[in-house]
Image: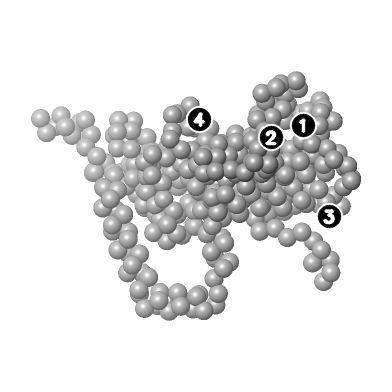
Amino acid sequence: MQEAEDAPFFEFLRATPSDLTANPPLASSLQAFETALFLLSLRRYPSALVSIGSALESALKAKLRIPPDRIRYLGQMLDDLRPLPASLEHFAPKGEKTSKQKRFTEIRNRIVHYGFTPRDDETCVVELLETGFPFLCRVYEEYFDYFLDWREIRPDAPDFHALSEDEMKKAGLIPYVADHLRVAIQVYQDGRQLDLPDRTYCINGLRRIVTHGIHLQARTWSVDRALQLADECGILFEAQAEELEALERELGDCRWTFDCPACQSVETARFAFDEAKLDDEGVITPTRGGCVECGFSVRYQEPFLAARLLADQIVEHRQAILEALAYVIPSDQDDQDDE
């Protein structure tokens, strides 16, 4: 009983490094990473950045086996570990005064010592996706043979269950959480060169699944029973049906039914497509939509997010989508026939 109470507890990790209990800074690093996820769900983006900075420092302390009474800063520990693996050198090249790691550290130190305002939100999200999350992932991979994202273990694997038993032991995050972390980084990279008013939307999928998980855990028996009774009476079903009808009217005819990429509810999401790309090139590009079960949504002004989140479902339903929407979107040949 005492051993179970002394072991670190994690909400979103399905596996931990084998030497976790023997290396306390590594446990601290993973706890700081999880804390960052919770802070994202609360939209405390600067605090999440600070937490990821702590996760990086603790991970390097674990690698160097630095005792509690010795103070070493992130840059100093990186120098202690040089020469760095190429994947880490990318973030912290030797002698570079304007490296990604130094910019991340400067912003983190400013927030720690001088606080933050809402103006810092986008800057912090960008730093998390540009440096914080990818850098931390590479540190775990290079020094502990541990992977937050299961796909980094074997990129050609069609899904998580294709990994071997030994490979699964190295896969830290619950697969669907890892998928959303990866999508957030990809969406940021996709739109990196675009002049966008706000890039915080890149993490909306990740933020939503964390928030949804918290809400599920917070439900009491009485609430669950009330929801069950309401569902039995058809109240929730009717309300959701009305919301779906309203959403479908808003999206128009060029849309499709999807399972929600955030809460996983079956066929509760509707997303519209880019009609021009579908008509001219046969390219299925979702642009906006949402889920009536959990409230997750993607706006037209948030490029690449819906496409990344729905990529697997679009591959699965591609032929059906093209066949169904051929009756909705007129082709050039139809126009010629009308003439």
Q: Which residue is farthest front? A: 114
- Give coordinates of residue 297: x percent, y percent: 41, 50
Q: How far separated are the C-alphas under marks 4 and 1?
A: 27 Å
Mark 3 surroundings: few (<14), some (14-19) or many (≥20) residues within 10 A: some
Q: Residues within 10 Å of mark 1 (few under 14, many from 20)?
A: few
The answer, for residue 96, to whether it is visible in the render is yes
Give how far apart the Cα atoms at labels 3 and 2 are: 28 Å
Residue topped by disc 4 = 192
Q: How crowded is mark 2: few (under 14 residues within 10 Å), some or many (20 or more)?
A: some
The answer to the question of whether label 2 and label 4 lie on touching residues, with beta carbons closer than 8 A, is no
Which quadrant of the rendered structure holds the C terminus?
Answer: top left
Spatial CA distance of label 1 from label 3 is: 26 Å
Q: What element carries label 2?
A: helix
Question: Which circle, 4 or 1, is nearer the viewer?
Answer: 1
Residue 258 position, x and y percent, is: 40, 52
Left or right placement of residue 90 versus residue 184 in this view: right
Residue 145 against residue 265 in the figure, above or below: above
Q: Which residue position holds label 1?
A: 75
Amino acid of disc 2: Thr
Q: Which residue is drawn at 85% across and 40% down?
A: 71
Q: Nearer the viewer, residue 326 or 104?
A: 104
The answer to whether residue 101 is above or below residue 117 is above
Q: In which quarter of the image is residue 14?
A: bottom right
